[in-house]
Image: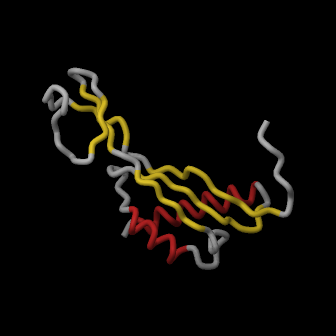
Amino acid sequence: MHELSVVASLVETIEALAGEHKAKSVTGVWIKVGPLSGVVPELLESAFEMYRKGTIVESARLSIEKTPLRAVCRACRVETERTDYAPDCPACGSTDLEIAGGTDLILERIELETDEPVSPAQ
């Protein structure tokens, strides 16, 4: 399960960000996962549960948003969100498609608990 190494890297990144902001703990983690990211969201969640013990994210709530697969037809330029992996354009039938989204794994946001008040972004 390579999701465990993904979570290890994720926690390392979060720990660095939490350190920069002098956080006592992380209370929330938001991630976006595309269907072609190579990560299974349910396995990522299980790996997070196993790995977080004893880390700054131990009490954090994990939220995973599944993003859609998007494709652009190079023939007619129609962009579609796909629920399947069909190799043809639903508008013109061309098989010359370009993946436009759904390959990413993004750390969208983290929520930190700190002793210092946070000033609003300018």
User: Residue extending furthest left?
Assistant: 93
Q: In which quarter of the image is the N terminus?
A: bottom left
Measured from the top left, where is residue 53 in percent x and y? Answer: 59, 78
Number of marks in picture: 0
Residue located 20% across and 21% down the image = 75
Measured from the top left, where is residue 91 in percent x and y? Answer: 19, 28
Residue located 59% across and 60% down the image = 29
Task: Say left or right for 10 vs 96.
Answer: right
Measured from the top left, where is residue 71 in percent x and y? Answer: 29, 35
When the figure is inspected, residue 94 is found, relative to residue 4, above or below; the finding is above
Task: Say left or right for 16 vs 36.
Answer: right
When the figure is inspected, residue 49 is found, relative to residue 87, above or below; the finding is below
Task: Say left or right for 83 vs 47.
Answer: left
Q: In which quarter of the image is residue 62?
A: bottom right
**Front position in the image: 111 or 24:** 111
User: Residue extending furthest front?
Assistant: 91
When the figure is inspected, residue 82 is found, relative to residue 95, above or below; the finding is below
User: Residue extending furthest right?
Assistant: 116
Residue located 42% across and 65% down the image = 3
Q: How is the image coloured?
A: secondary structure
Residue located 67% across and 70% down the image = 56
Measured from the top left, where is residue 66 in percent x and y? Answer: 41, 53
When the figure is inspected, residue 8 is found, relative to residue 88, above or below; the finding is below
Q: In which quarter of the image is residue 101?
A: top left
Q: In which quarter of the image is residue 76?
A: top left
